[in-house]
Amino acid sequence: MSSFSEKLKGFLVKPVETFQAHKGESLGAAYQYYIVLFVIFTILYGIVAVVMDMNFMSSTIDALS
């Protein structure tokens, strides 16, 4: 059985092949990967939001009002 980090890399790099290889696993295992990928997404989104300074949101709201 492959390690957690190998599976996570597989889901990021080759998702179709990895899902086919692990389709017999429990739903709990799927939630573990979902949580890890969600945390990675949240961190990356936070970085982008800080860099962009969220000015596009305030200007959009001003334009719509």
Image (cartoon, grey):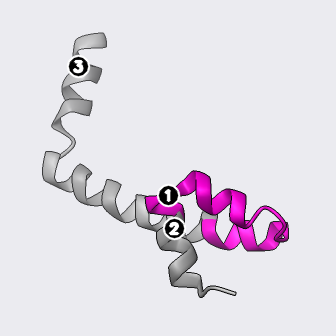
Quickly name the residue at label 2. Answer: 10
Residue 16 on the magenta span? yes
The chief SS type of the magenta part is helix
Please, what secondary structure does the residue beneath circle 2 have? helix
Left or right of 9, for residue 23:
right
Q: Position of residue 10 (x, y in %)?
A: 51, 67
Please, what secondary structure does the residue beneath circle 3 have? helix
Q: Earlier in the sequence, mark 1 or mark 3?
A: 1
**Residue type, label 1:** Lys
Q: CA distance from mark 2 to mark 3?
A: 43 Å
Q: Earlier in the sequence, mark 2 or mark 3?
A: 2
Quickly name the residue at label 3. Answer: 62
Residue at 60% over, 51% down: 16
Q: Which residues are magenta?
A: 11-33
Tally of marks: 3
Of all residues shown, which one is farthest toward the top?
64
Quickly name the residue at label 1. Answer: 14
Q: Quadrant of the rendered structure where residue 34 is?
A: bottom right
Residue 57 appears in the rendering:
yes
